[in-house]
């Protein structure tokens, strides 16, 4: 399965400040909860109590070694959308830079929304899980989950830490949930786990340019931004069997034309342990972002 992220109108990078502020630490006030939704798996937990309650969610729409992450609560009231935000998950980790969205998250108030986060990012923003030669069907790394101590965000000198403790058991449940999603789509996760290769998008450059060039006009005029997930089922002959767009953020006019473009996509199909082509999954995130 391919793990790419199409970012429209990306923000330019700037220098990365170090974690200098003493973090505000918020302790957990609930156990982990795993929601088996129709189109995604969502792992959530609450921190703090009363007026100080905070919310944390890891969201996955298919098996992956990264997840969409949302945090919300009063500790994030002064965080700004698309402002440089440093993240880390344990004390010895070098903070890595991100540019998340912000928005209102139900009754929890101001939230910070990440399209995808991986626990093994470094300060340069690179992600070792995206290197070639990785597994066809990646999953959340349980060893890294066990090493994790918290989810800590720093922006403009303010740092907030949600004290999760180790997350390996929670990630194991999330991994199982996404494998179950694949079965619901009629795919064979076990065959993917032992496969030689994922589907390879042959005309990717040409079609990606079309997707990137087509920021929906009405949404652009209204300044709407958002994160979407695209799931493509690739048949054993390399043709697109189906394409599904799932919105990760609430928008009114932002409808992606990506699935229309993907009807022209051509793939070299996935190949199982014996080298036989088989029906498989191609998935990616699409971020619509105003300059």
Image (cartoon, rainbow, N blue to C red):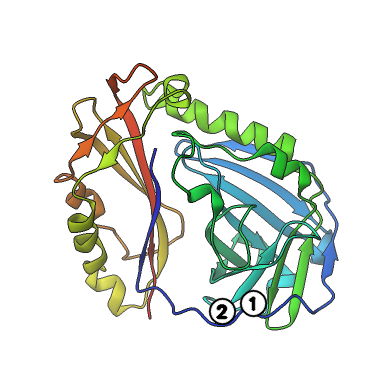
Which residue bears the numbered disc 2? Answer: 83
Q: Closer to the camera, 28 or 64?
A: 64
Q: Is residue 211 left or right of residue 139?
A: left
Mark 1 vs mark 2, foreground winner is 2
Asked whether disc 1 touches disc 2, contact meaning CB atoms under 8 Å apart, the reply is: yes
Please state, as top left, top right, bottom left or bottom right, where the C terminus lies in the image.
bottom left
Which image quadrant for residue 188? top left
Image quadrant holding the N terminus, namely top left
At mark 1, the secondary structure is loop
Q: In this rendering, would 291 be left or right of 266?
A: right
Q: Is residue 195 above or below residue 281?
A: above
Seen at 25% across and 36% down, the residue is 242
Residue 191 placed where, x, y %?
A: 42, 20
Q: Is residue 226 above or below residue 192?
A: below
Q: Position of residue 181 (x, y in %)?
A: 47, 30
Q: Residue at x 69, y 67 (%)?
A: 95
**Marks 1 and 2, how far apart at CA:** 8 Å
Please tell me in which quadrant of the rendered image residue 231 appears. top left
The disc at residue 79 is 1
Position above or below: 92 against 184: below
Image location of residue 7, percent across then percent down: 37, 65
């Amino acid at each position: 399965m391919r793990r790419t992220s199409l970012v429209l109108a990306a923000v330019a990078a700037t220098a990365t400040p170090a974690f200098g502020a003493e973090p505000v630490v918020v302790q957990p006030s609930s156990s982990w909860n795993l929601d088996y939704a129709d189109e995604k798996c969502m792992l959530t937990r609450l921190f703090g109590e009363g007026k100080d309650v905070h919310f944390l969610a890891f969201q996955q729409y298919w098996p992956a070694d990264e997840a969409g992450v949302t945090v919300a609560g009063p500790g994030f009231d002064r965080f700004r959308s698309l402002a440089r935000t440093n993240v880390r998950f344990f004390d010895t980790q070098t903070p890595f830079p991100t540019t998340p969205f912000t928005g209102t998250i139900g009754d929890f108030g101001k939230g910070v929304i990440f399209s995808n986060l991986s626990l093994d990012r470094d300060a340069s923003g690179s992600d070792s899980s995206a290197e070639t030669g990785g597994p066809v069907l990646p999953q959340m790394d349980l060893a890294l989950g066990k090493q994790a101590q918290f989810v800590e965000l720093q922006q403009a000198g303010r740092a907030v830490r949600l004290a999760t403790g180790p997350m390996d058991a929670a990630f194991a449940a999330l991994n199982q949930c996404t494998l179950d999603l694949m079965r619901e789509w009629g795919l064979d996760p076990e065959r993917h786990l032992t496969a030689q290769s994922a589907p390879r998008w042959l005309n990717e450059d040409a079609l990606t340019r079309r997707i990137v060039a087509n920021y929906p006009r009405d949404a652009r005029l209204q300044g709407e931004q958002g994160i979407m997930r695209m799931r493509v089922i690739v048949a054993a002959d390399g043709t697109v069997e189906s394409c599904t767009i799932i919105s990760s953020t609430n928008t009114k006019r932002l409808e992606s034309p990506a699935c229309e473009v993907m009807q022209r996509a051509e793939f070299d199909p996935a190949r199982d342990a014996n080298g036989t082509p088989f029906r498989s999954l191609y998935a990616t995130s699409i971020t619509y972002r105003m300059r």
